Image (cartoon, rainbow, N blue to C red):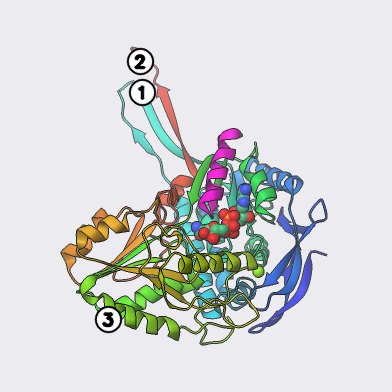
Amino acid sequence: MTSTTLSTPSTGKYEQPTGLFINNEFVKGVDGKTIEVINPSTEELICSVHEATEKDVDIAVSAARKAFEGEWRHVTPENRGRLLVKLGELFEKNADKLAAVESLDNGKALSMAKVDVNMAASTLRYYGGWADKVEGKVVHTNNDVFAYVKKEPIGVCGQIIPWNFPLLMWAWKIGPAVATGNTIVMKTAEQTPLSALVASTLIKEAGFPPGVINNITGLGRIAGAAIASHMDIDKVAFTGSTLIGRQILKAAAGSNLKKVTLELGGKSPNIIFADADIDDAISWANFGIFFNHGQCCCAGSRIYVQESIYDKFLARFKERATQNVVGNPFDANTFQGPQVSQLQFDRIMEYIEHGKQSGATLETGGKRKGDKGYFIEPTIFSNVPDDARIGNEEIFGPVVTISKFKDADEAVRIGNDSNYGLAAAVHTKDLNTAIRVSNDLRAGTVWVNNYNQLHHALPFGGYKESGIGRELGEEALANYTQTKTVNIRLAGSIF
Ligand code: NAI
Ligand code: MG
């Protein structure tokens, strides 16, 4: 069996594929292993899906290689674009179902899952538009030479994605890779395989040739590791923890030196100046950390408030945080659902315990919510000692630290005091402060008077240990192309 009938509270019954999607077909794993998929809201089993091991990775890579060297090479850039646009349209057509499956499996509020699906559709369409606009150039070196530089696809790309935005990360990775003519072996996260399996049915429906986009579910340490060290994968793109990002780089170095791009963690500062619109700043601070239950690589997990408004801000921010509705993702009012898994729940609760023991002040939250499902109260710590783990490490949950600063210089210094550099934000009405502080923050994205606002046309990625390379925008095309120089010596040349 490579599918099963499931039901979501918002859309009712549907057919859920459970196989590995290779060569446009759902197949069982060679070893016959399966992975249990858990509903994080109820802790109950949703279904089991087939698990890919090294052998299945080999099969998927062969399919991707065959497609890359065969039919796919002859699909024009224009038609690659058409396929991506079609896939984006199918995402929109199936938006209710995709969003419901995402909420069921990941636990995110249905309203947020719908935004993810729309953004995924936009990303696919956007890269569809790029497909026939990847151009090279002619370079004049001297009159006896005709030289040109062209962009070519890299080849078979391994793509390893996390569980916090399953469909969105899928689209961010597939869009630029397909637009530039590569083929793909995608490995979704073991915690959240379901939405990408539904999306895989749309790959076939959109008309992609077999083997261009293969989608497998497997464990990181088995299927993920097999991708990272595979001798016939030309490039690997990874989103996840810094720990595993380092392992991927090592595996690439120890195998075939495949190209690597990494989108890793963060501990992003959210800086609020005294002249900011306080209501707006509180809303963005709240959204900055508690959106997606704090499971965002760019979460604004360190809030710094200028000292003259600190007390007022903290009091109102606490009040705001307690108003966030935490509960069933399918309820219309829910803002925050459960954490994705027991493991993540335990990790976060451990950080909260560390926070309490570090001497920091627990301002609000800190407890489990309810007795079933991985729900955690929005949690705020103040007076955090400099070396406390909660102030320095990525928690990836609804936990934030808040402290005060005197002036812009201090805000920049403490804002930059991290090994990470994914994102940062500044809230102020002063244009000079906004621009000067943005210039000085060592982060791949700086938001001014907002937070967590991403767009498919704007590059996203990390400074420092937050990653290598940029996703989205025109820049992402560079991750999936390599440059060929053709140097032609003309007849009659004197050299
Ligand atoms: P992870 O980094 O282990 O998992 C992310 C992806 O990598 C998954 O698809 C997983 O199967 C795969 N993977 C795991 N081990 C691998 C290996 N040895 N070789 C190749 N692929 C491998 O992250 P995990 O354990 O789910 O979460 C742990 C922490 O990582 C979180 O608490 C958070 O701090 C961070 N994280 C950051 C994300 C981001 O968006 N930057 C997303 C997910 C997690
Ligand atoms: Mg799940």
Q: Is residue 454 left or right of residue 335?
A: left
- Front residue of this view, candidates 113 and 343: 343
Residue stretch in magenta: 237-254
Residue at 38% x, 61% y is 268
Asked if the residues shown at circle 3 and circle 1 are in contact, with their CB atoms under 8 angstroms apart, the answer is no
Q: Within 10 angstroms of label 1, few (less than 14), some, or many (20 or more) residues? A: some
- Front residue of this view, candidates 31 and 71: 31
- Specify whether tag 1 is near ligand 1 (CB below 8 Å): no
Query: Circle 1 is placed at which residue position?
Result: 145
Q: Quadrant of the N terminus?
A: bottom right
- Specify whether tag 2 is near ligand 1 (CB below 8 Å): no
- Which x, y percent locates residue 349? 55, 69
Q: Quadrant of the C terminus?
A: top left
Judged by depth in the image, the label closer to the viewer, 3 or 1, is 3
Ligand 1 rendered quadrant: bottom right
Visible residue check, residue 161: no
Visible residue check, residue 282: yes
Residue at 65% x, 36% y is 231
- Which x, y percent locates residue 274? 21, 73
User: What secondary structure is the stretch in magenta mostly built from?
Assistant: helix
Element on which disc 3 rests: helix
Element on which disc 1 rests: strand
Query: Circle 2 is placed at which residue position?
Result: 493
Asked if the residues shown at circle 1 and circle 2 are in contact, with their CB atoms under 8 angstroms apart, the answer is yes
Image position of 424 with respect to 102: above or below: above
Residue at 51% x, 62% y is 124
**Is residue 239 rendered magenta in the image?**
yes
